Amino acid sequence: MILSNITVPLLGLVDTGVIGHLGEPYYLGATAVGSMIITFVTWFCGFLRMSTTGLAAQAFGSQDQQQVLLVLSRGLLVAFAIGISFVLLQSLYVDSALYLSGGSEKVLEYAKQYCEIRIWGLPAALANLVLLGWLLGMHKAKYAMWLLIITNSVNLSLDLLFVLVFEWGVAGVAWATLIAEYSCLFIGLAMAASTLQTSKSALLKPLFAAPKQFFARESFFPFLALNRDIVIRTLCLEICFVFITFMGARLGDTVVAANAILLNFLLLISFGLDGIAYGAEARVGRAKGAKDSDAMQLSVSVANRFNIVLAIGYSLLFLLFGQYFIQMLTNIDAIVTYATEFLPWIIALPVIACWCYLYDGVYIGLTQGATMRNSMVISTFLVFFPTWFLLKDFGNHGLWAAFCFFMAARGITLYWHYKRNYANANWTD
């Protein structure tokens, strides 16, 4: 999962590198703003992957095959419903988001072009979250790995073709991602059908064959409650990311372009650490379904060791090669100079943030959405925004300092709750 997850931000780095060499900062700024507007929806709907992983892992641990299929079917139904809604309301959503971003005229022009293409991929992108989460919950990590690697390879290849050969610019990046998202959907459905040893059309069979069971109160209401808590948690996280992007846009094209590079580095870090968290999700969820407290303790302990090693490795990587990575992504001197000034924040972040990624995974496996929600609300509104307000006179440095405190607060609150409630061999509920 670490290897497959890293392909996602590597793709983002290729996007940034391709656009970053077009000669003007506003191309990179537009891609950053447009991508954030679309990614806001997919990250906001991250509950689809998280809840699906936890519920599928618990059903797998309890060997309830009917519940395994219901978890997948419910997730796909919700994903398609949300995705189609955004397609139908695209003008309202995109125009409002671009207005709030406050970028320059050129940034807004190309960002709108990007969004008007990418938004048609949302139904597939959200369904892919469900499929990925379900495969992880079913302990099909190799399927999940190949799903991500194949689709991201398609995206990368089309990026290079559309931008460098066809010279489609920002629109080329958007079209590449759109095609890759639907490719991922069809491959993922085939993998799910193979796992269940059934046909792709049978994946939604529970909805039509037994709608009463599909919406059964004892299982559907907890599904909604868990998703509600994860939605609130994810919304808080998204608010922080959007705030950094939009505040950077207000500080100028060079700032938003430099922040786009740094945020791509952060994604490389977070997706790698999430690979460990994904493993913890599946194993902790399976342990809870089987009511095996010793297995849960072992899963968390092993994941913790890998977590620390990988975090230190990331910090060393950016300490030694960070400036070289920036120069690979853009040849615009002003952006290189500005991004290099803020590189120390990226060097520090892996060690600061690794704990929140790991314990997010643990609590997804436990399907303790309320705990994740409370941790994120505290970290966002009692740490991130107050810290930024106190440090706003430091400009972009104030933004990154607030983000570091925010990530540390997430890890501290989740670790405290885990030690207080679950870190003992007698855990049973």
Image (spheres, rainbow, N blue to C red):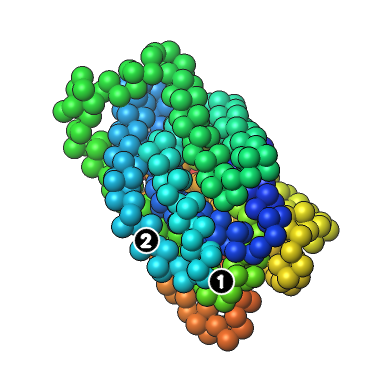
Residue 248: which numbered mark, if any? 1
Amino acid bearing label 2: Asp
SS under mark 2: helix
Residue 163, horizontal then vertical, whole percent:
63, 44
Q: Classify the position of the N terminus by image quarter.
A: top right
264 versus 210 height, above or below: below
In this orientation, which residue lies closer to the viewer: 127 or 305? 127
Q: Return the x and y of residue 333 as percentages of the image width and height.
A: 77, 67
Q: Residue at x 55, y 39 (%)?
A: 176
Crowd class of label 1 (few under 14; some 14 to 19; many from 20; radius 10 Å) = many
Left or right side of 82 for 375: right
Q: Is residue 77 above or below residue 335?
A: above
- Kindly indicate whether the residue at mark 1 contacts the one at mark 2 (C-beta within 8 angstroms): no
Report which quarter residue 260 is drawn in: bottom right
Give the residue type that dot 1 points to: Gly
Q: Secondary structure at mark 1?
A: helix
* Picture quadrant of residue 306: top right
| Residue identifier under label 2 | 95
